[in-house]
Image: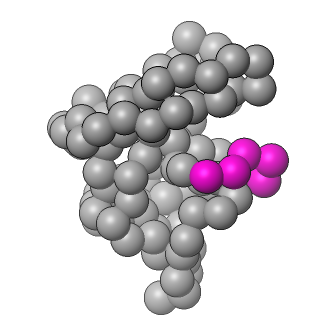
Amino acid sequence: MQAQANNTGPFRFAVDTGASGMTRADSRLVRTMALLAGGSALNFDGLQSAEATTVHIDSLSLGALRHRDITAIARDYSIRQLELAKFDGILARGSSATAC
């Protein structure tokens, strides 16, 4: 799905209804938007837990939904993706959003 982050984009976000918790930002999005590391969070990928860097995104819009003041886990997803399936982030179940 096409999304706007901090009023720029569009960026390609996957919606993962099985993932709970925090939004994820691919390292390319972090570099493109010059997002600063803001801390860390425990991340579980289904096989193992690891500490991951977090970044702050002021706003993330997907259609009529808008997320504000988002803490996102920053990871490099590109090494696991086929060229046609590349995405800039993942929206997870449990991320709060409001309709615009």
Question: What residue sits 70% from the left and 58% below the top?
Answer: 93
Above or below, 49 relative to 18:
above
Nearest the eye: 46 or 81 = 46
Question: What residue sits 47% from the left and 24% below the top?
Answer: 51
- Is 26 left, or right, of 82 in this rendering? left
**Rendered location of residue 28, percent (x, y):** 37, 28
> What segment is highlighted magenta in the picture?
15-21
- Is 91 left, or right, of 6 in this rendering? right
Please tell me whether residue 90 belongs to the stretch shown in magenta: no
- Is 64 left, or right, of 80 in this rendering? left
Main structural element of the magenta stretch: helix, strand or loop? strand
Residue at the bottom extreme of this rendering: 100
**Rendered location of residue 24, percent (x, y):** 51, 42
Instruction: Decide if residue 89 is in sight here.
Output: yes
**Rendered location of residue 34, percent (x, y):** 19, 38
Question: What residue sits 39% from the left and 52% below the top?
Answer: 71
